[in-house]
């Protein structure tokens, strides 16, 4: 954990949070005319979370899991930083990976399954061994109840020093009772980092160490 904490504190101080793509062609399906191109290039300075995902994937060893892959921008950021020997699983319940290129889908290191409920214990157990996931990125429904349930289900499959990344930790728009993922952030009793101001401002971005 100390190694993770030192690394995260170091990258937080970096000023230029723009992905340096190992393969710039990987984002070719995202037209420069779209808002998503502005986001993934962090043109507005508020979408550095793709850079964080890229950096964290470079840093960790072992399996990376993404819960929620709509459009595929974060999928590309994780994939581009993937090392030989790593495995990457990306799950959703809606099939909309419009920006994910064919070579990513065909890469044997990658499994993309858009018929995979993030809370389906049976599917999770049949896919993963206990303590096998080094990084978990959660970006599904924007409520405390959802992220709490996801962590409870996936915790036994995380390594003892896993990194958990949660998008939209301060977004309250999707919750009628205004209980957002921020409650999860407040309750976390391990090391935690709120990097909202330069990652996904104002809806939030958090990094957690077990």
Image (cartoon, rainbow, N blue to C red):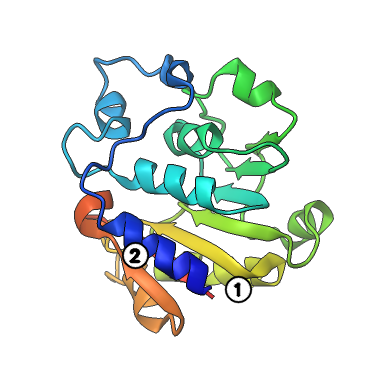
Circle on res. 152:
1
Quarter of the image containing the C terminus? bottom right
Q: Position of residue 138 (x, y in %)?
A: 49, 55
User: Label 2 belongs to which residue?
Assistant: 9
* Furthest residue toward right: 126
Q: Secondary structure at mark 2?
A: helix
Which residue is located at x 52 percent, y 45 percent? 58
Q: How many labels were placed on the picture?
A: 2
Q: Is residue 200 visible?
A: no
Which residue is located at x 52 percent, y 47 percent? 57
Q: Position of residue 122 (x, y in %)?
A: 79, 59
Above or below: residue 186 compared with residue 52: below
* Picture quadrant where residue 206 is located: bottom left
Question: How crowded is the residue under tag 2: few (<14 C-alpha within 10 Å), some, or many (20+)?
Answer: few
Relative side of 104 to 34, left or right: right
Relative side of 158 to 19, left or right: right
Judge by depth and name the residue closer to the eye, 69 or 76. 76
Q: Position of residue 85 (x, y in %)?
A: 73, 40
Marks 1 and 2, Cα distance to the nearest angstrom? 26 Å
Judge by depth and name the residue closer to the eye, 128 or 161. 161
Circle on res. 165:
none
Relative side of 14 to 190, left or right: left
């Amino acid at each position: 954990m100390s190694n993770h904490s030192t690394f995260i504190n170091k990258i937080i101080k970096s000023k230029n949070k723009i992905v340096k793509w190992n393969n710039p062609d990987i984002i070719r399906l995202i037209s420069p005319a779209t808002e998503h191109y502005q986001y993934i290039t962090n043109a507005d300075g508020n979408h550095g979370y793709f850079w964080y995902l890229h950096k964290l994937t470079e840093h960790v060893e072992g399996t990376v899991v993404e819960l929620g892959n709509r459009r595929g921008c974060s999928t590309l950021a994780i994939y581009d930083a993937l090392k030989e020997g790593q495995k990457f699983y990306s799950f959703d319940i809606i099939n909309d990976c419009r920006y994910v290129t064919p070579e990513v889908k065909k890469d044997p290191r990658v499994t993309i399954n858009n018929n995979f409920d993030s809370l389906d214990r049976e599917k999770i157990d049949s896919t993963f061994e206990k303590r096998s996931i080094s990084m978990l990125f959660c970006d599904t429904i924007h409520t405390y109840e959802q992220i709490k349930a996801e962590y409870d289900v996936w915790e036994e499959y995380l390594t003892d020093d896993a990194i958990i990344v949660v998008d939209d930790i301060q977004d309250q728009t999707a919750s009628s009772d205004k209980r957002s993922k921020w409650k999860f952030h407040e309750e976390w009793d391990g090391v935690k980092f709120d990097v909202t101001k330069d990652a996904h401002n104002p809806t939030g971005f958090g990094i957690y160490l077990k």
